[in-house]
Amino acid sequence: LQLYVRTIGRKHMQKIYTNPEQLPAVLSVEDVGSYLSISRAGAYALSHTDGFPVLVVGKRRLVPKNRFLAWLEANCEGE
């Protein structure tokens, strides 16, 4: 299993997850975006949709890995 890290600019680094085992137990919205290969803005928009498993802690939006993977499986089309 490999986890790729890409440098964006001087300060920001983006984790690129290639399979579910690499995901942390609690994901940030940026982690969700990286796993789904969508933009940060798209990941935040997704986190505001009804039924998406997000925990709001102060101003942070966190996503439990097990609930995210279950949501992803339940919302895949054509399966």
Image (cartoon, rainbow, N blue to C red):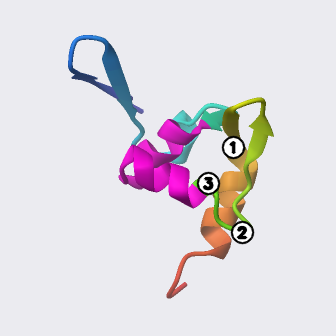
6 shown above or below 28:
above
Q: Dot 1 corresponds to which residue? A: 63
- Nearer to me, 64 or 2: 64
Task: Tell me residue 9's x, y (percent).
Answer: 20, 19
Task: Tell me residue 65's x, y (percent).
Answer: 68, 44
Residue at image coords 22%, 11%: 10
Q: Earlier in the sequence, mark 3 or mark 1?
A: 3
Nearer the viewer's eye, disc 3 or disc 1? Answer: 3
Q: Which mark is residue 50?
A: 2
Residue 37 among those drawn in magenta = yes
Residue at image coords 67%, 39%: 61
Residue at image coords 30%, 12%: 11
Nearer the viewer's eye, disc 1 or disc 2? Answer: 2
Quarter where residue 24 is shown: top right
Q: Dot 3 corresponds to which residue? A: 47
Disc 1 to disc 2, how far (Cα)? 14 Å
Residue at image coords 55%, 76%: 76
Task: Tell me residue 20's x, y (percent).
Answer: 54, 46
Q: Is residue 31 left or right of residue 75?
A: left
Would you call the spot at circle 3 few (<14 residues within 10 Å), some (14-19), or many (20 or more)?
many
Q: Is residue 10 left or right of residue 53?
A: left
| Boundaries of the magenta span | 28-46
The type of residue carrying mark 3 is Ser
In the orientation shown, which residue stands out farthest toward the bottom? Answer: 78
In the orientation shown, which residue stands out farthest toward the top? Answer: 10
Q: Secondary structure at mark 2?
A: loop
Q: Is residue 40 left or right of residue 5?
A: right
Quarter where residue 27 is shown: top right
The type of residue carrying mark 2 is Asp
- Nearer to me, 53 or 50: 50
